[in-house]
Image: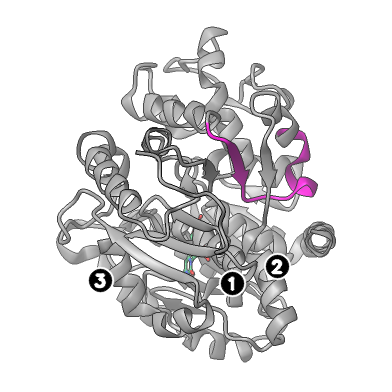
Amino acid sequence: MEQDRSSQSRPPHVLVFPLPLQGHINSMIKLAELLAIAGFKLTFLNSHHNHERLVKFNNIAAHSERYPGFQFKTITDGLPLNHPRSGSWFLDMFEDTMELKMKESLREVLVNSSPPVDCIIGDGFLGFALDVAKELGIPIIFFRTSSPCCFWVYHSIPDIIQAGELPINGSEDMDRLITTVPGMETYLRCRDLPTFCRKLDIEDSSMKLVVKQTRKSLQADALILNTAEELDGPILSQIRTKCPRVYAVGPLHAQLNTRLNAKHGESYDHFSNTLWEVDKSCIFWLNKQPNRSVIYVSFGSITSTSREQLVELWYGLLNSKTKFLLVVRPNSVIGKDGEGEDVVMELMEKSKDRGYIVNWAPQEAVLNHPAIGGFFTHNGWNSTLESIVAGVPMICWPQFADQHVNSRVVSEVWKIGLDMKDVCDSKIVEKMVNDVMVDRKEEFAKSASEMAKEDKEEIKMV
Ligand code: UDP
């Protein structure tokens, strides 16, 4: 079954295969663009559902013109097109519904590919890609799009259980230190572990799935991570004790921007690869605000909030007297009978002079806007990296996946933000916004801009 990849006179053909989620697509397309700039032939394998949205909200024709060797192919994600794909759909559906169908489709694409695929860069969560690659004799590199710190915690879960530090018992002090994750002994607490670790059941299916995929990531020919040595050096050294071929290739959005700016100039219109319609009107609003006076509030592409949580956040923002730009994705507020959508309209009306609300923002442009002084974030890894590179301090309100670990590292290791995990109280929101935007503004601005500077130095050197 092995295809002939010998004596090539053509550029190597790389197939990039992301998990069908916005955050994963974002960083994997950026990696694919960088490889296309370097002269590789690229196939980006998207799900039908996400590709439809990518085509709808981005100028894909211009993308193809810019990168002639870059093609998109689509396969099923295993779900009907009209499935809402919201809430915790992914972990719930992955093993039973999605994995088998995606595996078959991947195999078919690889077998029929012309020119043949020379290397797969698979999302490290799609462990089945390794089985297909081995069967067809194609080298495979796994790309984990979440943070290295969290990758390391996921990998260590069996050891934490073995040491008796998990499960967390019901009445536990959540500030208890977890001592069995090498390199994190001094700062990782129970409450910083991924949320599925809070379940009393150590046989929990989400936990088992994540551990399985993480351990499998290390069996690939190499592992790449979206970070820089400067940021995550100590944890990368720990991961390398399990897999020597670990490459830190990020932050990818900054790597790509640097190369595109060098080639085309600063004003170059970059693609956002977005799956929602971007509301650029917020940039005009930001243009009218003083420097570092606005806090940007956004919780990524998957997180939902309850109506009560949104109202609590909104009161905290309003009472802080700081102006805010708030992203509320369509259908992301959970309330009875359309109450979620009503509350957004109501808040919009009531905070016209203090805030601006959009469905989806051009986030990188927003974070790099001079009017932005802080980012109230859920700490998805892309958002965290985008904030670091822009030199914007954070208020962290993590919800799931790698976010709980990320917020701990942001606040305790890098000291470029405050961690609000596990609470949603308007008084605390107000206090934290005031700390970051007013009372401790210079302290946070200094640490965030130093970190951004170190990062830029490393990007120049790559
Ligand atoms: N994003 C955006 N506009 C928004 C909100 C988010 O462009 O209004 C982008 C953001 O720049 C980031 C991605 O969506 O690249 C979200 O990825 P992240 O890893 O931060 O979180 P996830 O969505 O996976 O939870």
Q: Position of residue 86 (x, y in %)?
A: 27, 54
How many C-alpha atoms fall within 10 Å of the one at disc 1: few (<14), some, or many (≥20)?
Answer: some
Q: Is residue 246 visible?
A: yes
Pointer 1 or 2: first along the chain: 1
C-alpha separation, residue under disc 3 versus residue under disc 1: 28 Å
Given this view, does label 3 or label 1 mark the residue nearer the observer? 1
Residue at the spot of label 2: 390
Whether pointer 3 and pointer 1 mark residues with C-beta atoms closer than 8 Å, the reply is: no
Q: Is residue 225 magenta?
A: yes
Residue nearer the viewer, 102 or 280: 102
Assess whether mark 2 and mark 3 are in contact (beta carbons under 8 angstroms): no
Side of 185 where 138 appears, left or right: left
Q: Quadrant of residue 211?
A: top left
3 or 2: tag closer to the N-terminus: 3
Give the number of the disc on residue 364.
1
Task: Magenta stretch: give its range.
Answer: 220-235
Which mark is drawn over residue 342? Answer: 3
Relative to 374, residue 286 above or below: below
| Outermost residue, front side | 7
Q: CA distance from mark 1 to mark 2?
A: 8 Å
| Amino acid at pointer 3 | Asp
Disc 1 C-beta below 8 A from ligand 1 = yes
CA gap between label 3 and label 2 equals: 34 Å
Q: Is residue 346 visible?
A: no
Q: What amino acid type should be assigned to the residue bearing mark 1? A: Glu
Residue type highlighted by circle 2: Ala
Secondary structure at badge 2 equals helix
Q: Residue at x 35, y 57 (%)?
A: 113
Comparing 156 with 6, the one in front is: 6
